[in-house]
Image (spheres, rainbow, N blue to C red):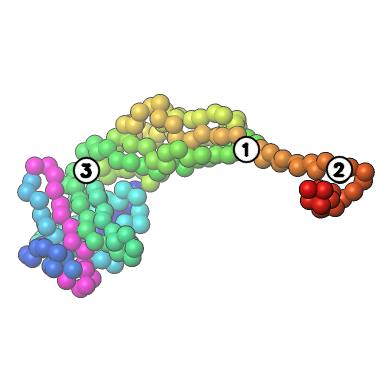
Amino acid sequence: MAEFKITGTTRTEFGKGASRRARRDGFVPAVIYGHGEKPRHITLPAREIGIALKQANVLLDISIDGKNELTLPKAIVRDPLKQILEHIDLVLVRRGEKVVVSVPVHSIGEHDRDGILEHVHNTIDVRVDASAIPNFLEIDIEGMASGSSKYAADVKLPAGVELASDPKMIVVHVSEKSTAVVEEVVVAPAADGAAPAETAEAEKTDK
């Protein structure tokens, strides 16, 4: 897994105005909590934390006032339109400590081409050492037929990684391709060989 070292600054101002000023100056407000410790309110450099968060389940080694804190991002808030980082919740972890995290699942192999592969769940929850979280996990879809599914229990787990999701949770499913039905409209021939338009005109005249 990826691990980033980053320097944070203790926050001394709070509220929406202070948060806006921090973001304007290139910082992202954040809070660190966990292990029964009092929450610490900090700011992190927006550019560096933005790069770090491109990795799933990134481990952040944050230096604050001469002390290092090992953390995992727990909740990330972004502006819904601009996607700018607005706030981050970080949970304290310890090396060797088991944590439950969601890890992306990648499919490998070729399924039946008469079907369509559906990723019902793109991630599964696992219990793993906080400093050894895999970047992704794999599920083998080789030869899967239309109408078949594979479950969380079928995901390959490396040594030291335990499944935390329901083993019966569907991860991938191969559905049957829908067959388009084309309805053909048949126009009955007009009487005495007349064209349909001519027949309709004749009917109007008779009336």
Q: CA distance from mark 2 to mark 1?
A: 34 Å
Of the numbered discs 3 and 1, the one sitting upstream in the chain is 3
Nearer to the camera, 196 or 125: 196
Where disc 3 sits, the SS reads loop
Which of the 4 image quadrants contains residue 147? top right
Q: Is residue 23 magenta?
A: yes
Q: What is the secondary structure assignment of the residue under circle 1? A: loop
Boundaries of the magenta span: 21-36
Q: Residue at x 14, y 44 (%)?
A: 34
Can residue 137 be seen at all in this image of the molecule?
no
- Residue 108: x and y in percent read 53, 40
2 or 3: mark nearer the eye: 2
- Expressed as whole percent of the image width and height from the top left, the position of residue 174 reads 55, 34
Query: Compared to 42, does 186 lie above or below?
Result: above
Q: Amino acid at mark 1?
A: Ser
Q: For residue 178, which numbered disc appears in the image? A: 1
Judging by the rendered image, the residue that carries numbered circle 3 is 95
Could you give the CA–CA distance between mark 2 and mark 3, rounded to whole angstroms?
Answer: 83 Å
Residue nearest the viewer, comparing 1 with 78? 78
Residue 185: within the magenta? no
Mark number, residue 189: 2
